[in-house]
């Protein structure tokens, strides 16, 4: 059977492991758009996304060659998990969380209304943004991750669940606990988040 007619990922993996290297190319081409789009959406840098994409598939190839791949029927989810972990590793090394920059088209804090544009108002507004970002850092990693993906990247809970390899209910639960913990932190630190 010609390589392109192989219907599922496992058949292509088996073909690759049997020595047909073109089956790996078909497999990568089948999923590259989705994997690359996810990486780019999170890192917001085309060159960095390309590097992480390449690292992802280097890891895929090395794992396949080593014979340790055991994710039968779940190839894409496995690749997305590798990409996700490499993104987290990158941001851990650089010790920062990716943040979406505010622009004319998008403001993370739309709900904060500034009626007057005085210097004092701008300072208060900037302090609120800073306080919220600082509070996010106190959240457990899993809660912080879901909150950032949902509110900074506007990802659906379905996409978050898929990217983090958990159920939608788990993603929703993490978001719920993140919001509960944010409220507790606001109370503990006696912050007033209104302009």
Image: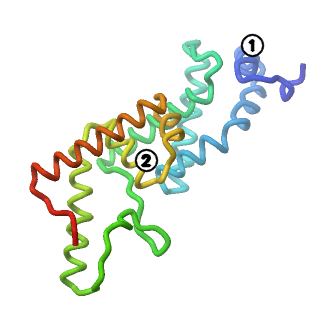
Please provide percent x and percent y for residue 181.
22, 42
Please provide percent x and percent y for residue 174.
35, 36
The residue shown at (21%, 85%) is: 119
Please provide percent x and percent y for residue 89.
38, 38
The residue shown at (90%, 19%) is: 1
Q: Is residue 12 above or below residue 119?
A: above
Q: Secondary structure at mark 2?
A: helix
Q: Secondary structure at mark 1?
A: loop
Q: Is residue 183 left or right of residue 147?
A: left
Q: Is residue 158 left or right of residue 98?
A: right
Residue wearing tag 2: 149
Question: Label 2 near label 1: C-beta < 8 Å?
Answer: no
Q: Indicate how the structure is coloured in the image.
A: rainbow
Q: Residue 34 versus residue 158: which sits nearer the camera? A: 158
Q: Is residue 63 above or below residue 131?
A: above
Q: Which mark is residue 171?
A: none
The quadrant in which residue 68 appears is top right
Residue wearing tag 1: 18
Q: Residue 40 versus residue 181: which sits nearer the camera? A: 181
Q: Is residue 32 above or below residue 78?
A: below
The residue shown at (38%, 67%) is: 110
The residue shown at (72%, 28%) is: 24
Q: Is residue 193 above or below residue 166?
A: below
Give the mark nearest the N terminus, 1 or 2.
1
């Amino acid at each position: 059977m010609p390589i392109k007619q192989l219907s599922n990922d496992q058949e292509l993996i088996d073909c690759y492991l049997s020595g047909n290297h073109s089956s790996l190319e078909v497999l990568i081409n089948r999923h590259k758009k989705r994997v690359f789009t996810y990486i780019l959406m999170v890192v917001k840098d085309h060159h960095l996304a390309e590097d992480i994409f390449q690292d992802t598939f280097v890891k895929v190839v090395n794992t396949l060659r080593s014979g340790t791949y055991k994710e039968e029927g779940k190839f894409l989810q496995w690749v997305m998990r590798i990409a996700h972990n490499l993104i987290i590793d990158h941001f851990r090394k650089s010790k920062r969380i990716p943040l979406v920059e505010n622009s004319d088209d998008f403001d993370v804090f739309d709900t904060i209304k500034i009626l007057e544009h005085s210097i004092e108002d701008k300072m208060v507004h900037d302090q609120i943004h800073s306080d919220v970002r600082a509070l996010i850092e106190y959240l457990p990693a899993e809660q912080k991750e879901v909150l950032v993906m949902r509110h900074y990247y506007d990802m659906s809970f379905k996409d978050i669940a898929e990217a983090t390899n958990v159920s939608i209910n788990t993603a929703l639960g993490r978001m719920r606990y993140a919001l509960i913990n944010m409220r507790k932190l606001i109370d503990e630190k006696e912050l007033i988040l209104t302009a």
